Image: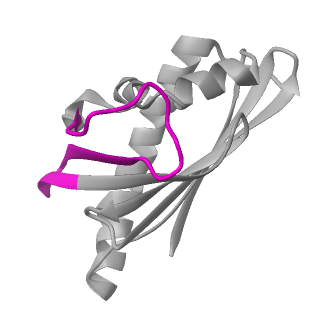
Amino acid sequence: MNVLKREILLTAKPTEIWDFLATPLNLNQLTPPDLDFKILSDLPEKMYNGLMIEYEIKIPTFGTRLWLTEIKHINPGVSFVDEQRKGPYKMWYHLHIIEEVAETMTRMIDQVTYQLPFGRLGILVDKILVRNMLANIFDYRTQKLYELFGKGHA
């Protein structure tokens, strides 16, 4: 298993961050344009446990892939998980956590546990390509969140 963990501080109330993340259509704003991200499902205004979201994503070198995600383990205002049901990974489990640091300061934690298919070949592809690709995606996401909410300072 591979783990990618990111923690950022945002200058916003936790409720503001939660409301943004709990709105599935906002996922478009946090995804780099070069991934050509397209949501195929009809989406509700707010996420709920068991929500299935199907989308298409262009993965460099590997082409366009369908991805089906289930939203689960929602602890309103605090955390939720998106877990791949169908897609390019053998396993993808993305935990989102929101913590109040001060009245207008929020720590946002992303922890992705993932595994590629194809055994040893998958391990090699992760080291050569996927790990850096995911880091770039989360770098983009961080910059977008800073633009939307402001960069917090410890």
Query: Which of the 4 image quarters holds residue 58?
Result: top left
Q: Residue at x 38, y 68 (%)?
A: 127
Left or right of 148? Residue 128 is: left
| Residue 77 visible in this rendered orientation of the protein | yes
Query: Which of the 4 image quarters holds residue 125?
Result: bottom left
Left or right of 154? Residue 88 is: left
Query: Which of the 4 image quarters holds residue 150?
Result: top right
- Which one is nearer the viewer's eye here, 138 or 17? 17
Residue furthest right as drawn: 102
**Residue 81 highlighted magenta (yes or no):** no
**Residue 153 percent coordinates (x, y):** 78, 21
Q: How is the image coloured?
A: one colour
Q: Residue at x 71, y 34 (%)?
A: 77
Left or right of 92? Residue 104 is: right
| Residue 96 visible in this rendered orientation of the protein | no
**Residue 52 highlighted magenta (yes or no):** yes
- Which one is nearer the viewer's eye here, 5 or 45? 45
**Residue 146 percent coordinates (x, y):** 57, 18
Which residues are drawn in magenta?
38-66
Q: Residue at x 36, y 77 (%)?
A: 123
**Residue 31 percent coordinates (x, y):** 35, 32
Compared to residue 63, the image places residue 151 above or below, namely above
- Which one is nearer the viewer's eye here, 51 or 137? 51
